[in-house]
Each structure stands twice: as structure tokens, then as C-alpha cells.
Amino acid sequence: MEVLKKIENKFLNRTELHIKIPHKDAPTPSKESLKQEIAEKFKAEAEKIEIKYIFSQKNRDHSIAKVFLK
């Protein structure tokens, strides 16, 4: 998992992340599995993680996700 962009949104009191998720020879990860992986990596509670979207392109071995950490 690679963080492409990190924004500290002080007005809404959250961190906004754009993440690149590699998944070679596997389907796009589910929101729940991604939520658990993000919770472990960023030491955050899973209940405070909001995944806005996971976007995959055809014939690519990665997805892009937009995530909010509260």
C-alpha cells in the first residue's frame, strides 16, 4: 500500500488519503478488508475509517482508493 497524497483537513478534523493498493493476480479488495489493512498500518480504529471509493482500471494490477481517517 502506497500513500499517493495525504491532506490534513483541520476544518473537518480528519486526514484524507489517496492510496495505491497493489493486488496482482487478485480481484479488487473489498472495503472491509481494506479498512482492516488501513487500521493496522495507520494505527487507527476501524470504526473511524471511511472509504469513499476504490477505483480499478482494466488490465491494471492496482487500485486507487480515497480514504478519510477521523
Image: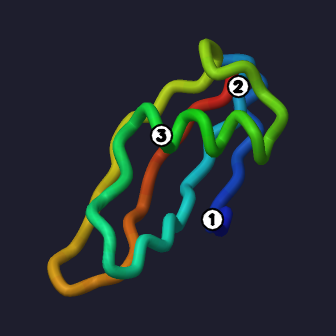
Q: Secondary structure at mark 1?
A: loop
- Nearer to us in this view, 10 or 22: 22
Disc 1 vs disc 2: Cβ atoms closer than 8 Å? no
**In-image side of 22 versus 38 (left or right):** left
Disc 1: CA contacts within 10 A as few (<14), some (14-19) or many (>=20): some
Residue 37 percent coordinates (x, y): 63, 44
Q: Residue furthest left?
A: 58
Residue 51 or residue 9, whichever sits in front: 51
Instruction: State the residue position of label 2.
Output: 14
Which circle, 3 or 2, is nearer the viewer? 3
Q: Is residue 17 left or right of residue 56?
A: right
The amino acid beneath tag 1 is: Met
Disc 1 designates what residue? 1
Query: Does residue 11 sit above or below 15 in this rendering?
Result: above
How are the residues colored?
rainbow
Question: Marks 3 and 2, Cα distance to the nearest angstrom?
Answer: 21 Å
Query: Image point 42% across, 71% down: which residue?
Result: 23
**Dot 3 or dot 2, earlier in sequence:** 2
User: Is the Cβ of the residue at disc 1 closer than 8 Å to that at disc 3?
Assistant: no
Looking at the image, is 4 positioned above or below residue 7? below
Taking the view exactly as shown, the residue that stands out farthest to the bottom is: 59
Image spot of residue 41 (x, y percent) = 77, 47
Percent x, y of residue 3: 67, 63
Q: Residue 65 appears at what percent x and percent y? A: 44, 52
Per the image, label 3 sits on a secondary structure element best described as helix
Residue 5 picture quarter: bottom right
Label tally? 3
Q: Residues within 10 Å of mark 2 (few under 14, many from 20)?
A: some
